[in-house]
Image (spheres, rainbow, N blue to C red):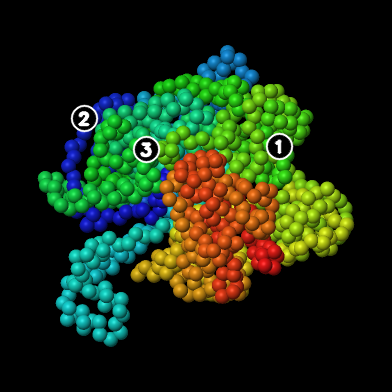
Amino acid sequence: MSVEAAGRFRFATTALLSMFLLLFVAPAGAQRVASDTQDPGQVMDEDFAAFFAKWTSEPRYGSPLVDHLPVVSGIPMPKDVLGHHIGATETLTYYEDILRYYRALAEATPRVQIESIGSSDEGRDMVVVWVSSEENLAGLEHNRENLARIADPRGLSEAEVQRVLNTTTPNYHLIGGLHSGETGAPEALMEMVYRLATETSPFITRIRDNVIVSVTPVADPDGRDRIVDWFYSGLERQAELDAEKAAKEEAAKDSVAAEAEALEGDTVAAEAGALEGDSLTAEEEEEEARPPRRPSVPYWGTYVLHDNNRDINLSQVIVRALTDWYFTAFPPIMHDLHESGTLLYTYSGGPPQNPNLDPVLFGELSWFSNWEMTQMAKWNMPGVYTHSFMDAWSPGYLGSVVYNHNGLMRMYETQSPRDIDVDSLRAARLEEEASEDEEGEEGQEEEEADSVSLFRSTQHLGAPTGRGGSQEREWYRGHPVPDDAVQTFTRRNNVNYIQTGVLSALQLTAMAPRTVLENFYIKSRNSIKEGRDEPPFGYVIPLQRDMTRVTRLLEVIRAQGIEVGRLNEEIELEEGTFPEGSYLIKLDQPYGRLAKNLLEVQYYPDPDLRTYDDSGWTMGYAFNAEVEEIGDPSVLEAETTLVDVAGFEGEVKGDGSAGLAVAHLGSTNMVTFRYRLRELDMRITEESFTSEDQDFPPGSYLVTGTSEEMARAQTEVLDLGLTASALEELPEVRSHDGDAPRIAIYSEWQRTQEMGWYRHAFDQFEIPFDLIYKERVAEGSLGSQYDVILMAAQNVNRDAVLAEPADRPEPYQQSEKYRYLGMYGSTPDLTGGFGEEGVEAFEEFLEGGGTLVTTAQAVSFPIEFGFARTVYTERPEDVRAQKPLVQAVISNMDHPVFYGFADSIYPMKYGQGPVAFRVGVADEDRVLARYVGGEESVLSGLMDGAENIAGKAFAVDSRPAHNGGGRVLMFANNPMYRWQNHGEFNLVFNSILNWNDAPKKEEEK
Ligand SMILES: [Zn+2]
């Protein structure tokens, strides 16, 4: 769940093996505890048993739940379809093969069904696989209806509730492969589904009879295929390196004289270097033994990597598919399987806990995780623990969909596997069993370093909820992690852990199915009751200046299953009078607490507590939209009409034919309008005017053209929810050409995620762009192709720009073998920067009048290469913030960047790496906006030390940028953060639309 695990594949080397220090006692006796885990009458696969014994590094890394696999005539086990057992070393399964297996299984047994739930960005079929008894699956549709009634029990009498609870089977949903670099779960789930469908042990039979299990085999199927390609190409690369090394060692054996002879003639320098094996220093030899870490694969899915689990507004296709499916099935439990912990962390909830989540949930979390820890302790499995980094504050994780909706979210972080040679491992163990040598300690140190890097994303925050990755015995970890457990954790170990944990959780569910359902009902009922009994009772979203951002906000609310009504008539409340047509969200509904969670201010409970991710997400602030919290209980009586889609049609007033004025009222759709009508002439006004009682503030468009073009423009105004007037005559106001620039988004080959959110937003808003990399930059002549280049949220600093390519190229290219590499860009070498050549290309681009827009860390580029005049970054001291929403103040309201903003103070998302600008006196008037600062300016979430950002600049228009030409717009904040801060998107869009236009006043000075 946490850090990027792509490219983290480890390859066994003899050097590594020699480090293993191994003392263990095989706990054979422990396995007899569960006498019901096998049916003596069922035939077990001997080949599987041998495979299991070989590839489970030690017996205690397996369990009696998974050490056998039944053979059932006519029903394929994974090996029958895939050609290998699950957990085979150096083996990962492509998505199409995963589907092929499940389809073969569903074909063969009525205990397995497959349901399509949508399509991924790249068109892969997304599915849910069901497994349960034949009888349970025959009644699946009816059971889903029952679960829907428990999820929304309004209108049911107590007797009816009891009847529904008594006749419903709980549905336990599992999610694998959300994070592509965490590869184990999609493998383990295949075997587990087979096991659940076929095994006749009392243990499995009870689960099959009492639980309906459903599975998302791979939540990000596009990323899965890319990571499998990357994995296999990495193995291939490793084989090449090994061969080279072997050849080098062979050559080193020959005499130096013989080498010299052999090298005469057409000697290649590289060969000479490769032959110097016998003159390597000890340090160099160590370097040789450990080749540099391979870069990560640049992409998983189309836009984001780990952030598919931070998508609070449900924007990504795969996130939406699963969320939409949720409302057709209402599983009371969803369990998201990740792979960034040491052996097995089972999420138990931790502070800070969001008060909108039901108290019952916090009992359930420990109930399940402690059960799993207990069971796995019985099998003597080391390193299973609760109470680590993950808290319960943000509602923005994918699995949150279930606890946001009164169910139970569960989550694992399992140990990522290693491909090791188990035969050599066992031989090495025998040799070294008796003595501890220094190499062993080194191995331990290496492991400690590994744990630190795995948990870096929370360790540096001083995660208060436990010490993830720690190895000692703790009150929340009965069996500690042995020294060598991580390095020797085979793929089969990984499968054993995931499967044993999950089967234990299913066992508990099967033992208490009614309790699980009853809890689900109680939590749903509590949510409705809370909205009826305690303020706030509702949220009103009045009709306001820009309804398009309101529409997007309401789309998210509706996607969360929250009921939204429109007032049938004006209402008077303590908070004020709201006209007919205003939107109202009443909180006495099953998802009232979620609505409150999303719309209220987040008061962070304790500044000493850290949270894993976001601390403040109040939607009204993030969208810069007016949302009224209502404490007047009479709002619950207001008559409303529920709305399904909150679409809002635009308006064209008047019927003049001189031109069309489109008001810039802050809509983010203004940029879409411009690009949809790219070939039309538009001017952008610099002064306000009025027509047909409509105010047209600076930044509004004046569109002229043929009557047919005007008709098209009017159609788009309506479609995009904009406000326009068909003018009798054009107003006499200052204006500039609203030419639509040609855009490139520059990307580095690594850390593409933050930037991926920009690509996603540009696609959503239909802004055409080229995605360019160092290769295109180094070619030069950027101005011949682009007017605006966006560098967003990537660290394009001096070191990155001037980095030399690695000795050995690292290609990211499509081939017949690796079909999914080379997508979203392709390169023969991921390493190295665009170099001086590229810097010169940017100089030329700016001199020629180009505009560079930089955000977040990317502001380093103009600053470090002299395109930012007297602007430098500065890190405010003693500020502790976790992405809160704070107030910004606009310094120059006339500047095009702030066209459409109604007020000079507006809410902004404060980044994780707090950066501001220090600006020289000469450039003071180029500052566009500053942080307000001070405690009062913190609107939502955690910020300590807010007084230290008071008045600091974060937006600057550096113009002219180089040799009297060009422009660099710099935003130290991140104005397009995870499809979350829609209220700030126009900083980027306005920069684009007015790329070569400054307010006239400034030029006249
Ligand atoms: Zn993960």
- Disc on the earlier residue, 3 or 2: 2
Image quadrant in which you'd find residue 143: top right
- Which residue: 59% across, 70% down? 960
Image coordinates for residue 561, horizontal then vertical, percent? 61, 34
Q: Residue furthest top?
A: 159
- Disc on the earlier residue, 3 or 1: 3
Eyeballing the image, is 142 above or below 582?
A: above
- Which residue: 64% across, 29% down? 630
Amino acid at circle 2: Gly
Q: What number is the disc on residue 542? A: 1
**How many numbered circles does the render carry?**
3
Foreground label between 3 and 2: 3
Image coordinates for residue 166, horizontal then vertical, percent? 52, 18
Labels 3 and 2 touching (C-beta < 8 A): no
Distance, label 3 to label 2, CA atoms, is: 37 Å
The answer to whether mark 3 is within 8 Å of ligand 1 is no
- Judge by depth and name the residue closer to the eye, 534 or 514: 534
Mark 1: which secondary structure?
loop
Q: What number is the disc on residue 464? A: 3
Mark 3: which secondary structure?
loop
Eyeballing the image, is 209 above or below 939?
A: above
Eyeballing the image, is 44 above or below 952?
A: above
Labels 1 and 2 touching (C-beta < 8 A): no
Foreground label between 1 and 2: 1
Circle 2 Cα neighbour tier, 10 Å, few/some/many (<14 / 14–19 / ≥20): few
Amino acid at circle 1: Pro
- Disc on the earlier residue, 1 or 2: 2
Amino acid at circle 3: Pro
- Which residue: 29% across, 41% down? 470
Distance, label 1 to label 2, CA atoms, is: 68 Å
Image quadrant for the N terminus? top left
Q: Is residue 123 visible?
A: no
